[in-house]
């Protein structure tokens, strides 16, 4: 079979598993298959590897091992955090989050609003995708059970001031959670002196496999488990531990901590070269969130007058993988909720593509995309009924 050419620029959707991670995992399928909860020596042997993995994640986050529990994914960590907060504060029926959260938080909040009588304040973002800490201060009430603000946005890469936000939460005695799925392994995180109580991590965004995650629970935080059953994870998450995947996540965390600085400057160089190239060769584009602090690997670009989905199809024909909106929201033809909340004009928002880089990308790949992309946009603008100068331009009636 012919090996297909893949230029994978969708690393915020998922990442390739590092071979070192795969190697770390394999013994746990057929050799070290004991149940870590078992009394015998074989269980104990496996338990020691769980401890190692926990320590590695803790080190990545500047946390203590006993503050980490393993979950099945970032989404489970998010749900666990929110449901724990509302269970330990049954009388408090208010939640604060942002309009740009991942569905893992947004849809939990919408569920609690629709079916459980909760009031949710969604903090707005400005044109660059930033939140206002003053708006946060004003939103907290005596009924607020939890504040959940993502560390970095998956679509734009915009970074939020979560440590300052957590201080504000702590000063008002409100629990603070951060979905750090896009930040862990990409930004330095040190929870030791922060006021963050709960923090979500996912394996498959940091070169570990899909289906494994972790949740940081600050020591002393009153906590209610999401999965109820056995006594695993000191009663904080029932279910026999997914040992191979936990070992993989631990290895990925160790590698991320070790290489973070080096990898960041590498991917930032690729990303910046890419953005400069796009700005130079294509007109009527905007880089979303460019004025804010951003993850070094993420580029969200709007091409005016074209449909993002069409760009993706043409890119895909050249072997280039990118995404419109977020992987979790695609399938719907509405422009991304993140870009709409930044008030990106509709003619731009519809033509938005997220390119997200990793250490596996190369400069040659960036050059190849920069060579192909202008022709794709040009072709699409020629057939676009909306493009400037077209007869339809300015007199389009949108159906509602
Ligand atoms: C991917 C992602 C998640 C979900 O993680 P899963 O492990 O896929 O459940 C949550 N939050 C953000 C910001 C993400 O990018």
Image: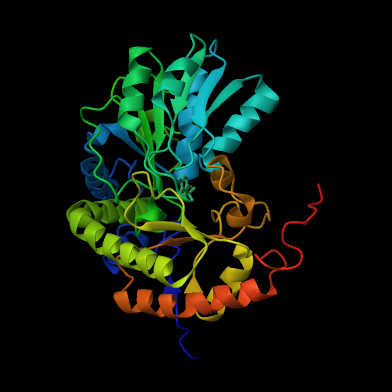
Above or below 138: residue 28: below
Colour logic: rainbow
Q: Nearer the viewer, residue 112 or 45?
A: 112
Place of residue 194 in the rendered image (x, y in percent of width and height, measured from the top left): 25, 27
Q: Residue at x 37, y 37 (%)?
A: 160
Above or below 76: residue 271: below
Residue 229 shows in the view? no
Above or below 210: residue 198: above
Q: Nearer the viewer, residue 241 or 55?
A: 55
Residue 144 shows in the view? yes
Q: Residue at x 30, y 30 (%)?
A: 163
Question: Which residue extends farthest bottom?
Answer: 1
Give the mark count: 0
Place of residue 299 in the rendered image (x, y in percent of width and height, measured from the top left): 42, 58
Q: Nearer the viewer, residue 65 or 91?
A: 91
Place of residue 218 in the rendered image (x, y in percent of width and height, measured from the top left): 30, 27
Q: Quadrant of residue 236?
A: top left
- Residue 122 relative to residue 347: left or right: left
Q: Nearer the viewer, residue 382 or 12?
A: 382
Place of residue 49 in the rendered image (x, y in percent of width and height, measured from the top left): 25, 49
Q: Quadrant of residue 22?
A: bottom left
Q: Quadrant of residue 20?
A: bottom left
């Amino acid at each position: 079979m012919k090996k297909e050419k893949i230029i994978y620029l969708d690393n915020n959707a998922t990442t390739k598993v590092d071979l070192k991670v795969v190697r770390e995992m394999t013994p746990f399928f057929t050799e070290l298959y004991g149940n870590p909860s078992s009394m015998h020596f074989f269980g104990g042997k496996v338990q020691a590897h769980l401890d190692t993995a926990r320590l590695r994640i803790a080190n990545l986050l500047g946390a203590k091992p006993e503050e980490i529990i393993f979950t099945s994914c970032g989404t489970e960590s998010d749900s666990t955090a929110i449901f724990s907060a509302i269970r330990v504060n049954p009388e408090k029926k208010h939640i604060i989050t942002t309009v740009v959260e991942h569905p893992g938080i947004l849809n939990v909040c919408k569920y609690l609003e629709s079916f459980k009588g909760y009031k949710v304040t969604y903090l707005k973002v400005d044109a660059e995708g930033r939140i206002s800490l003053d708006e946060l201060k004003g939103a907290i009430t005596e009924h607020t059970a939890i504040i959940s603000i993502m560390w970095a946005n998956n679509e734009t890469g915009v970074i939020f001031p979560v440590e300052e936000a957590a201080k504000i939460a702590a000063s008002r005695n409100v629990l603070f959670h951060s979905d750090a799925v896009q930040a862990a392994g990409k930004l330095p995180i040190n929870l030791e002196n922060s006021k963050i109580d709960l923090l979500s991590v996912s394996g498959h965004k940091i070169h570990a496999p899909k289906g494994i995650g972790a949740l940081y629970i600050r020591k002393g935080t009153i906590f209610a488990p999401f999965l109820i059953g056995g006594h695993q994870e000191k009663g904080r998450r029932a279910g026999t531990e997914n040992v191979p995947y936990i070992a993989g996540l631990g290895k990925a965390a160790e590698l991320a901590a070790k290489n973070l600085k080096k990898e960041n400057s590498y991917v930032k160089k690729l990303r910046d070269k890419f953005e400069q190239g796009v700005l130079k060769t294509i007109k009527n584009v905007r880089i979303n969130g460019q004025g804010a602090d951003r993850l070094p690997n993420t580029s969200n670009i709007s091409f005016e007058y074209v449909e993002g989905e069409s760009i993706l199809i043409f890119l895909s024909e050249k072997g280039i993988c990118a995404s419109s909106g977020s992987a979790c929201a695609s399938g719907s033809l509405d422009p991304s909720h993140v870009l709409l909340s930044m008030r990106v004009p509709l003619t731009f928002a519809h033509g938005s593509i997220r390119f997200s880089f990793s250490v596996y990308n190369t400069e040659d790949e960036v050059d190849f995309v920069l060579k192909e992309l202008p022709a794709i946009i040009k072709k699409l603008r020629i057939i676009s009924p909306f493009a400037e100068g077209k007869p339809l331009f300015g007199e389009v009636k949108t159906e509602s």
